Each structure stands twice: as C-alpha cells, then as structure tokens.
Amino acid sequence: MAHVSEPDLLALHGLRLKGFAEAGVVATLLRKSEEEVVAALTQASASELALYRDGRMKGWGLTPVGRVENERLLAAELGGLPPVDGVPARSIVESVYARFLALNGTMLAVCTRWQVKDADAQVLNDDSDPDYDAAVIDELALLDQAVQPLLVELVSVLDRFGVYPEGLTHALERVRAGDRQWFTKPIMESYHTVWFELHEDLLATLGIDRASEGAH
C-alpha cells in the first residue's frame, strides 16, 4: 500500500505547491477537509512555519523557515520508505522524474501551439479554426496517455501523488468538452496548472532546485 503522508507535511507541502492560497484551495489539492488544513496551518503558524496574510489578497504562505522544514520532511519521508517490489522508493521517483522531463518539452510546445498559431509571426490562436484546435487537443491527449502510466508508478510509492492523474484527466475532459480555459489558464486547475504542480512536486520530493534542474 502506498505511503500516506503526515498532515503536517501535507499542509506545508500544499503551500509549497500553491505558493500562496486560502486553506480551501490547499484542501482541494490535498484531498483533505478544509477544517483539517486550517488546523494544520494554524499549528504551523504557531511554529513560524507558515503565515496568514490578511488584506486585499488573503491567504497562507510558507515562511523561509517553513520551506526549509518542508524540504526536510520530504527528504526524511522518501528516505524512510520501504522498497516497492524490491526497488528503492527513491529510485522509482527518480526514474519517473527523468521520464517526466522527457515529456515536459513536448508539454510546453503543445501549450504554445494552443496559444499561438504562428510563433514566427506571433499570430494568436483565436479559435477561428476548429480543425487546428482539434489537432492540438489530440496532441494533448497523446501526451496525457504518455504521462498517466508514470503517475501510476508514483502513486504506488506516495499516496499524495494521486491528485495528479485525477486532475489531469478532469482538465483534459473539460478541454474536449469545449471549455478552452481548462487547457492553459492560470489560477485554476487547468491542465497546465496541474502539470506545473506535478513538476514542482517531483522537484521538491527529490530535493532538486528548479534553477539547477538541467544538471540532474
């Protein structure tokens, strides 16, 4: 059975992935109740690991100390997991990460084609050509078919990765249904948003800094 992360780790990790968010948004990401997340974040705040900002923009965020603690908890969690079918847990996550990176460039290119019809002439995609849009959506579907098996491997190690296959599938279904904002729109659970958070989760879990990613 996949390992279920502790509430204190999940609360900090949710803020790491979202950056700055209300507890309800973090709860949706973690598949927890808002009450559970508020309790965990309140405890984290008491330890100066998280901070709630009030005003025009309200929400929770990690403190610098909280980010370091999140990284410590993630490393301890992964290092303490038992092997899966004889394979060390870290080796599984590293293997998935390497194959995910191989798909990441394709994801960026597909998103660019969705937004810009002619990159050289900087012609935006205004959705006036349904055949063009359908072709790009087909590309996204093929990419989804490639990434989903990787997520199955991740979920066999860490239960918290289970949010990503569900999120990507839902976003793709919405795009196919004609709701184009579910492709790349930020500040919602679009396909691009879920993909970005998956990428960040892999980096955080393995202790890789995004700026030095190419060296791994």
Image (tube, helix red, strand yellow):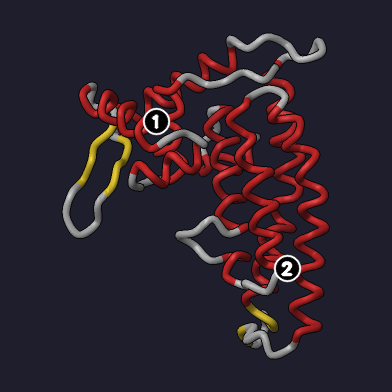
- Where 176 sits versus 204, above or below? below
Between 11 and 64, the residue placed more toward the observer is 11
The residue depicted at 55 percent of the width and 46 percent of the height is: 197
Q: Is residue 132 above or below residue 111?
A: below
Element type where label 2 sits in the image: helix
**Marks 2 and 1, how far apart at CA:** 34 Å
- The residue singled out by tag 1 in the image is 12
Tell me which amino acid carries mark 1: Leu
Q: In the structure shown, which secondary structural element does the residue marked by tag 1 occupy?
A: helix
**Residue at the bottom extreme of this rendering:** 128
The quadrant where residue 199 appears:
top right
Relative placement, left or right, of 154 versus 65 is: right
Instruction: Name the residue carrying label 2.
Output: 176
Asked whether the beta carbons under mark 2 and mark 1 sit within 8 Å of each other, the answer is no
Q: Is residue 61 left or right of residue 207?
A: left
Q: What is the crowding at mark 1: few (fewer than 14 residues within 10 Å), some, or many (at least 20)?
A: many
**Percent x, y for residue 22?**
33, 46
Q: Quadrant of the N terminus?
A: top right
Q: Is residue 118 above or below residue 74?
A: below
192 lies above or below 165: below
Q: Position of residue 116 (x, y in %)?
A: 64, 79
- Residue 122 sits in which quadrant? bottom right
The disc, 2 or 1, on the residue closer to the chain's N-terminal end is 1
Residue 154 visible (yes or no)? yes
Disc 2 marks a residue whose amino acid type is Arg
Residue reaching furthest to the left: 55
Q: Quadrant of the C terminus?
A: top right
